[in-house]
Amino acid sequence: MKAIRIHEDGGPDVLRYEDVPDPVPADGEVLIELRAASLNHLDVWIRKGMPSVPKPRILGADGAGVIAGTDERVVINPGIMSDGTMHIVGETMDGTHAELIAVPRDYVHPIPDGLSFEEAAAFPLVFLTAYRMLVTRARLQEGEWVLVWGIGGGVATAALSIAKALGARVVVTSSSDEKLARARELGADVAVNHATGDVVAAVKEATGSGAHVIVDDVGEATWKRTLEAARAEARIVVCGATTGPNPPAALHRLWWKQLSVLGSSMGTPEDFKGVYDLIAAGKARPVVDRVFPLAEARAAHERLEAGEQLGKIVLSIPGS
């Protein structure tokens, strides 16, 4: 089969479109003929160098296709629990940026009606992550206000979709006015340019006293404003820190406002069922930014690293 594989750490130039052996399903696994796969920042981090990931490695956590030899359209849950440990497709095992993949049958689900292969491949990892942040960890309630930093990213666009599906009101930020306009089309109640505007003032003007829930996976560049934009007893949910993990803690704001800071990572099979049900019911929908052929994965990585996307960058995989 053809696949995108890395043999060394580096930039997009280390991605190889090459022939690799077909996977052989183990007991309890099924073989999937992939039709689409999406990119995540996880792919960039692994490509640049994660010592825990052996090479060569086929990248890609998210994928959709058909069960080999059938017409059954399926999507993969990339968070595989085994012996109490979470394994991520494309990190601890070869991934979806290939024509074929073998995965446990319990982690394969029918593609919800109305979704293309590309849309199905766009939702699993980021929607699973955002659902756990908002629902399982922050326990978001109808009518509450959510602040989402950096609306271009996959987790941010998923958080917007899920929050609106649950009846919340959402403030989004970006340094791109074009992305902010698109976010308004997707349901954002307030959109603020965080490079030229005052995010804290905009949040307080819209909400009266601050956000109930804040989704912050940016870290050092946003943390001070996150604490200032939070209302008393707000919940701040963190799943990453793309600009650095060690901002000044400003502990006085935590106790004075009685804030809760909640860590969140990936999601359980129960979280996946929750977000899958929202999408199957048509209440939430993934956003596809651009589709590239599998063979053009380098260009897809360059777009992701440049931060040009709003939503998910997807690779189209031709059928055999």
Image (tube, grey):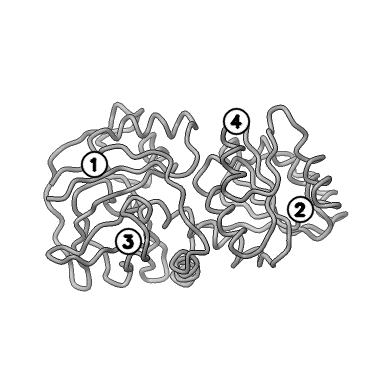
Residue 274: image tag? none
Name the residue beneath numbered marker 3: 75
Please tell me which of labels 2 and 3 falls first in the chain: 3
Q: Mark 3 or 4, which is nearer the eye?
A: 4
Classify 175 as above or below 110: above
| Residue under the image location 35 percent in, 52 percent down | 61
Name the residue beneath numbered marker 4: 176
Q: CA distance from mark 1 to mark 4?
A: 37 Å
| Residue under the image location 40 percent in, 51 percent down | 122
- The answer to whether residue 210 is left or right of residue 301 is right
Please tell me which of labels 4 and 2 falls first in the chain: 4
**Res. 58 image quadrant:** top left
Please tell me which of labels 3 and 1 falls first in the chain: 1
Please tell me which of labels 3 and 4 falls first in the chain: 3
Name the residue beneath numbered marker 2: 211
Name the residue beneath numbered marker 1: 56
